[in-house]
Amino acid sequence: MFRKKQLAITGLTVLMLCASVCEARHRPHHTVRTRGNEPALRSSSVLVLDSNHSSVLYSRKADVSAPIASITKLMTVLVVADAGLALDEPIQLTAEDRIVGKGAASRLTLGTTLTRGDLIHLALMSSENRAAHALGRNYPGGLSAFVTAMNAKARKLGMTSTRFVDPAGLSCDNVASAEDLAKLVVAASENPVIREYSTDRGYSVRVGRRMLEYRNTNSLVSNPTWNIIVQKTGFINEAGRCLVMQAVIQGRTVVIVLLNSVGKNTRVADAVRIRRWMEAKLLTPEHSADKV
């Protein structure tokens, strides 16, 4: 018994050391300098891209690969969609979906059965970790085949600085650059299910005898002044607060990528600042010809 307890303590110590190394390797940096004609943003890595013309409106460290947390789930759903798997197929959460570690929270109890469509809905809208894991586990060939497919899809989209190791985004080894994530957002925006589910304000599912109410992790989807086509949030300590979305601003369809924002509400505040900056910039005489 003592021997087993010693081994358990040793194993836990190793896991904690690995987590510390991972966090130190990707520890957020927030020394941000801006010029007077730039938006005052607090995200470390930023990209604002005009989707219609593929022109960069604003960029900061957009080519630097970094942890992306639950932004991963956009790729998870794209891979499921590519496989043509039925949305109405029931999937039961099993002990294999018990994810441990920081940020691994889930409101779905093991043994719950939901449709694949329900799991996609919760993964995109409310960033449900067990839902995303179950989607990967129920892929033909299992979880390892799914992760392989995620990386193959990234290569196909030209995401050259990207690597995936899990479908939920809880590992700090899921990394990408803002430039790569813009490509992912554009691809995701072409899928009607992703557009609908990621921008839904709320959704309910039955778990046992209870109905669980879920809300969107991005407060901007409830703001009637925003026209958001697709979006996803993400957070783990190593990644900071992240937000990607495609939205229509001043008649332009733009992709916004914000990585490693400091503070709980900063990613949303940065998106608002980008919108105001764009509106002010496009209303000046020298940019009036840019309007579409």
Image: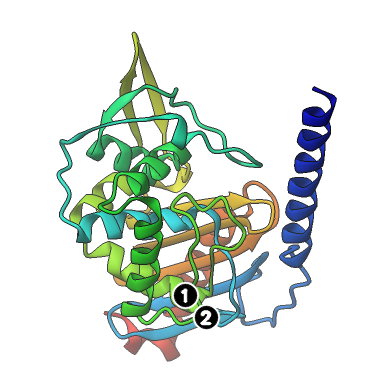
The location of residue 18, given as percent across then percent down, is: 74, 55
Q: Residue drawn 80% across and 28% down?
A: 5
Q: Residue drawn 44% across and 48% down?
A: 220
Left or right, 64 with respect to 15, comes to left
Q: Residue drawn 51% across and 58% down?
A: 243
For the question of whether residue 222 can be seen, the reply is no
| Mark 2, other Cα within 10 Å: few <14 / some 14–19 / many ≥20 | some
The mark found on residue 48 in the picture is 1
User: What amino acid is found at the position of numbered circle 2 in the picture?
Assistant: Tyr
Number of marks: 2
Residue furthest top as drawn = 209
Q: Residue drawn 56% across and 50% down?
A: 170
- Scheme of image coloration: rainbow
For the question of whether residue 167 can be seen, the reply is yes
Left or right, 115 with respect to 38, comes to left
* Viewer-side residue, 285 vs 164: 164
Pointer 2 with pointer 1, Cβ within 8 A: yes
Left or right, 34 with respect to 259, comes to right
Disc 1 secondary structure class: strand
Q: In this view, does 271 lie above or below 10?
A: below
Give the quarter of the figure containing the C terminus. Answer: bottom left
Left or right, 18 with respect to 128, comes to right
Q: In this view, does 91 lie above or below 109?
A: below
* Viewer-side residue, 147 vs 37: 147
The mark found on residue 58 in the picture is 2
Q: Earlier in the sequence, mark 2 or mark 1?
A: 1
